[in-house]
Amino acid sequence: MVKRIVVKAIGGFDQLKVEDGPVPPAPTENQATVNVKACGLNFYDIYVRQGLNPETQPPCTLGLECAGVVTAVGTNVSTVKVGDRVVVHCPKGGACAEQIIVDEDSLMVIPDDMTFEMAASFTINYLTAYFSLFHLGGLRAGAAVLIHSAAGGVGWAATQLAKTIPGVYVFGTASLHKHGAISENGVDHPIHHDQDYQKEVLDQRPQGVNIVLDNLSGVDFTKSQELLEPLGKVVLIGARGMLGSEHRSLWCVFKTWWTTKNVSPYSLIMNNYAVAGFNLNELRKKDPAIFRQTWEKILEMIRVGKLQPCIDSVWQFDQIAEAYKQLVERKNIGKVIIRP
């Protein structure tokens, strides 16, 4: 039997269970079997548990990313072999299991000196940040960026990536006790998330910022647009505003939907700014080549030390509820990892 983390039904932490399932069958010709050593947790999984992701509904096995060792390969597989240490992207979920079967293009070999925990930490966060800043945001030298939740997984990654460009000034929101950490990571102007961050930004930079990386939505969606200088962009990468607490809040869902349902073309034209959105799984589905190219680029930047993922904490499968509370209650700095 193989242990896996499942969400049984829409609900609270009590719906997260560790269950025994059948051993996966042998891989088909283009697949590989991986013994999982570490999994990365993401807000995506919380959306699934609360029934807020239309593509993946409970009951299901959680997890978008993991790392482990290849134990079997199909006859047509050429890029990995048995014994390889790999990072895995599971766009349809299912990564949080002791053993999984995935397509060859969902695997990438990692360096021998990279821990499984580190390998499981970077795919979702760093690729989301990279595409949002560089492809959608058009980040350039001398720009200014506001990164919400700068101590979270994507925020941490976005700060480091922004600082690879000369002269970029980073505003970042986070709880007060996290300000030291995000400053060390590259945030130039930390702001308490409950402060009037609009005033903080505009006092420092009256013309506004070039890019707002917004994972909040809700009322912050309007505030983000008001902070843009001409030719600026808001890039939406999530909707934490929909997550009221442990259980789904219909009021939070409605409020977020109401404040983001309309983007006025007239306002965009008259203010010379843009609003964009990003979904990594959809990008991979529609343009797998650019996903792969960027995945490899991020791994290389980590290998040579240009990027340094941060592991907040490591938990065991039977601690899954506590691990997700770390995310939901915004206690983490960096990535939360879980191990079989």
Image (tube, grey):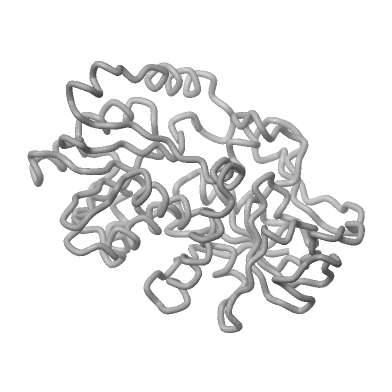
Q: Where is residue 292 in the image (x, y as percent from the top left)?
A: 56, 59
Q: Which residue is at the front of the view, 49 or 121? A: 121
Which image quarter is the C terminus in? bottom right
Residue 66 placement: quadrant: bottom right
Residue at image position (71%, 58%) is 317
Horizontal relation, residue 125 to residue 49: left or right: left
Farthest-out residue, bottom? 113
Q: Where is residue 25 in the image (x, y as percent from the top left)?
A: 92, 57
Which image quarter is the N terminus in? bottom right
Residue at image position (45%, 59%) is 334
Horizontal relation, residue 79 to residue 259: left or right: right
Horizontal relation, residue 178 to residue 91: left or right: left
Total numbered badges shown on the rendered structure: 0
Residue at image position (60%, 74%) is 110
Residue at image position (43%, 19%) is 255
Would you place residue 144 above or below residue 33 in this image? above
Would you place residue 251 above or below residue 60 in this image? above
Would you place residue 147 above or below residue 115 in this image? above
Residue 199 placement: quadrant: top left
Q: Position of residue 128 (x, y in %)?
A: 46, 50
Q: Which residue is at the front of the view, 309 or 135? A: 135
Horizontal relation, residue 283 to residue 95: left or right: left
Q: Where is residue 313 in the image (x, y as percent from the top left)?
A: 53, 63
